[in-house]
Image (tube, helix red, strand yellow):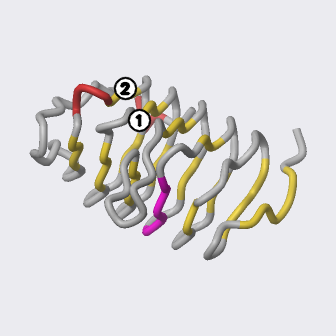
Amino acid sequence: MSDRFAKWEYPEIIEGRPTKYHWIVQGAAGFSLGYKTDIGAFTYINAREGVEIADYVQVGSHCSVYSVSTIDKKKGRVLLKKNCRIGSHTTIMPGITIGENAVVGAHSFVNKDIPDNVVAFGVPVEIIRVLEG
């Protein structure tokens, strides 16, 4: 891990209000944030049906994470597993799990689960390659 997390602290999360890092959570009671995470500015997290972000996860700026979709009435818990990385401007739909160490490229639309140790991107998202261990 880089030194940029040397002084990391859990941000204060208040329902519907931006954190000091300028990201927002609705449904804060359903939100779980891991240790040494990095969530970019202007990211929106709808955690009404549950969103769990594990340790060492990075989420780029301007992302949207939905546990509820009012357009198609889908709902379900979202899980971002340990050390996954989500590129900026990505949308994650309800009920999705993104695997440990997975990398999702910027501007992706994630409407299916992403396994551990892969690179995926696109609209809709597709698995591009397996990461070598």
Residue drawn 15% across the image and 43% down it: 20
Instruction: Kindly identify the amino acid type of the residue bearing the numbered disc 1.
Output: Val
Locate the N terminus and report the quarter of the image it occupies.
top right
Instruction: Kindly identify the amino acid type of the residue bearing the numbered disc 2.
Output: Ser
Label annotation for residue 51: 1
Q: Choose the circle earlier in sequence order: 1 or 2.
A: 2
Along the viewing direction, whichever of 22 and 17 lies nearer the viewer: 17
Residue 54: image location, x then y, percent: 51, 28
The reply, left or right, for residue 73 in relation to residue 86 is left
Label annotation for residue 32: 2
Residue 18: image location, x then y, percent: 14, 48
Q: Crowdedness of circle 2 by 10 Å Cα count: few (<14), some, many (20+)?
A: few
What kind of element bears circle 1? strand
Q: Is residue 97 magenta?
A: no
Residue drawn 39% across the image and 61% down it: 63
- Hey, which quadrant is residue 81 in on the image? top right
- The CA span between labels 1 and 2 is 6 Å
Locate the C terminus and report the quarter of the image it occupies.
top right
The reply, left or right, for residue 105 in relation to residue 67 is right
Q: Crowdedness of circle 1 by 10 Å Cα count: few (<14), some, many (20+)?
A: many
Write down the region rendered in magenta: 89-93
Discs 1, 2 touching: Cβ within 8 Å: yes
